[in-house]
Amino acid sequence: MYCTQCGNELKANAKFCSSCGAATKGKGKKPKQSQKKSSGKSGKSGITIPIPAAVLGVLGIIVIGFILMGGNDAPQQTMTSPEQQALRADVIQVAENFMCPCGDCNDNLAACDCAAPGGATEVKRFIAQGVQDGKTQEQMVMAVSLKYNISPIESSE
C-alpha cells in the first residue's frame, strides 16, 4: 500500500503516512513518478542534487567571493623604496639596544619576530612609528625603555 500524497510505502494497517503524515484512504496504488515529485506536502522540493556537486558548488562560491574580495594572503614581492629601507635600518639600530620583552624567546629585539603581545613585532612597530614621526634613535631608545619597561643592553665598549 502506498500513500496517495507522497508515494511512500505504508505499513499494512497504517492510518497515517510515516513520511508526510497524510491520512490513508484505504489501499492506495503506487503513484506515478510525476505525482510523487509534485506534491508539496512532503516537505521535499523535488530537486535532487548529489552531495558532491553541492559541496563543489559551495566551495566554488567561496573561492569566487575570496577572489572578488581581494583576500590573497600569499606573500607578495614588493619593491622597497629607499625611504622604507632607511626606516627599516633605523628600526634595527634602535632594536639592537634591547632584548625582546616578551619574556619567552630571550632573543635580541632586532633579530626576533615573535608576535606575542608586547613582543618584538609590537615594539618594532612602535619604533617605526616614532621614527616616522621624526624622533631620533636616542629618543626612541628612551621611549621604548619607558613604554615597555625594559632596559637597554649595556654595550661592552
Image: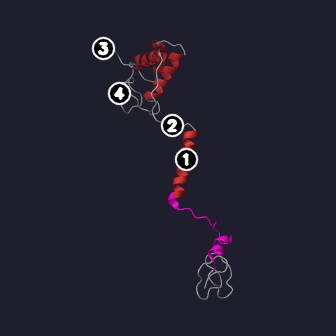
Mark 4 vs mark 1, CA separation in Å: 41 Å
Where is residue 79 shown, x and y percent of the image?
A: 46, 22
Mark 2 vs mark 4, CA separation in Å: 31 Å
| Quadrant location, the N terminus | bottom right
Sequence-wise, which precedes: disc 4 or disc 1? Answer: 1
Of 151 and 108, which appears nearest the observer?
Answer: 108
Q: Which residue is mark 2?
A: 72
Sequence-wise, which precedes: disc 2 or disc 4? Answer: 2
Q: Quadrant of residue 6?
A: bottom right
Which mark is nearer the camera, 4 or 3? 4
In the rendered image, the vertical position of residue 24 relative to residue 48, given as above or below: below
Amino acid type, callout 3:
Ser
In the rendered image, the vertical position of residue 3 relative to residue 150, given as above or below: below
The span picked out in magenta is 31-52
| Quadrant location, the C terminus | top left
**Helix, strand or loop at mark 3:** loop
Q: Which residue is mark 3?
A: 156
Mark 2 vs mark 1, CA separation in Å: 13 Å
Q: Which residue is mark 4?
A: 107
Using the image, tell me which numbered label, if any, was put on residue 62: 1
Which mark is nearer the camera, 1 or 3? 1
Mark 4 vs mark 3, CA separation in Å: 18 Å
Q: Are marks 1 and 3 in contact (CB under 8 Å)?
A: no
Q: Quadrant of residue 98?
A: top left
